[in-house]
Amino acid sequence: MTLYIQRYQDWERYNAAEDTGKAAPIDPDADAKRYREEIDTALKLEDWGFDSLWTVEHHISPYTMIPNPVQLLTYFAGATRKIDVGTMVVVLPWHHPLRVAEDITMLQNLLNGRHAYIGFGRGAARREFRQLGFDMNESKERFGEAIQIVKAALTQEKFSFEGQHYKMHDVTMRPRPRDPQTLMDDFHFSWGSPSSAPVGAAHGLRPMIIPQRAWDDYHAELATYAAARKAAGYGPTRPRIHLNMYCAETHEKAEEGAQRYIREYADSARRNYELDSDHFKNIRGYEHYAMRSQEMQQMREAMGDLYVANHVWGTPDECLEKLRKLSDAFHPEEYMLVCRYGSMPADIAEKSISLFAREVLPGAHEIPLGETIGG
């Protein structure tokens, strides 16, 4: 299960404040209520039978109110007993890499033998780069340097690094990681544009699919990913896949919820990344987004259609069948399910999760792991 903690209802107020400076102030009580509800729900996931808890990193907007995923997961490390945890993703260009290494080392030690699956990414939202004070044009180079520093900090008691953006001499870190190799073996990478896939693969990161295109497009991208891993001396692996989930007793009820809430999720992503803006044409390393921006201006409804088609919703039998088909096609290691998104109320989300846990999760756990990609 993945926590997003969205405040979709605040987008109109937020956009008005951003565009004109004239809007009502943020309602902190509404933010706090959403936080408490989603944390309370996540604390039930062990009893429901889920294997892990994931979360994301975003700043500034109502898209996701989780500016520090490792901090949130550290709370759950102490509040749970069995589950693994994961990030989807830590955006490396927004952080000092030594601090990232320290934070994930702390998390691994506090998990006491459970896994910390750390996903990394470059980031793609202009307002986040701007307000955090980083140049979006530098994201690819910063990412490449930062992942090298994180690995050095985990594996070497003392190291130096000389790069364009980071320069370090005789740097050390305490505490030392409990198991640096396992931590690095569990590193993942999520990419938005097809050309970015080899960036993470070249550093040995495992693939994480956050679907933004038709599923068939990802076969070629995973093949490219596997080839880049092999060229860099890393073995074959399996992807992890992010999905939105909505489960209901009847197809009609499930479709009603999916059409509303998954479309809201798609609209929130469009707003956060400004996918229909032409600003990407002026940013180095985001050419794929620039090519799609004009298309997106004409296809807002089509984006919602794509998200509804890509994600897992339906009756319990329908949800399980969709998971089986995706498993046959992509051989994933794990699914990370966002169970509350858009304007979905807490009681509706819990009803969906509870039904999924009772009637889908047992069958999902029986889906066999396929062969590794590129194996």
Image (tube, helix red, strand yellow):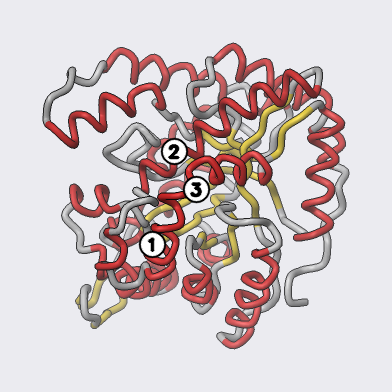
Describe residue 199's horizontal placement relative to residue 353 as left or right.
Answer: left
Q: Earlier in the sequence, mark 1 or mark 2?
A: 2
What is the x, y in percent for residue 175? 37, 55
Crowding at mark 3 (Cα within 10 Å: few <14, some 14-19, many 20+): few
Residue 293 or residue 73, whichever sits in front: 293
* Type of the residue with mark 2: Thr
Describe residue 336's horizontal placement relative to residue 167 as left or right.
Answer: right
Q: Secondary structure at mark 1?
A: loop
Q: CA distance from mark 2 to mark 3?
A: 40 Å
What is the x, y in percent for residue 184? 53, 65
Residue 271 or residue 202, whichever sits in front: 271
Q: Secondary structure at mark 3?
A: loop
* Type of the residue with mark 1: Arg
Q: Is residue 210 above or below residue 245?
A: below
Crowding at mark 1 (Cα within 10 Å: few <14, some 14-19, many 20+): many
What is the x, y in percent for residue 158? 31, 74
Find disc 1 in the rendering and name its residue. Answer: 122
- Please tell me which residue is depicted at 73% across the width and 18% down the height of the picture: 253
Q: Earlier in the sequence, mark 1 or mark 3?
A: 1
Question: Can residue 39 be seen at all in this image of the molecule?
Answer: no
* Type of the residue with mark 3: Met
Say the numbered circle drawn on residue 41.
none
Find disc 3 in the rendering and name its residue. Answer: 299
Question: Can residue 121 be seen at all in this image of the molecule?
Answer: yes
Q: Earlier in the sequence, mark 2 or mark 3?
A: 2
Location of the C terminus by quadrant is bottom right
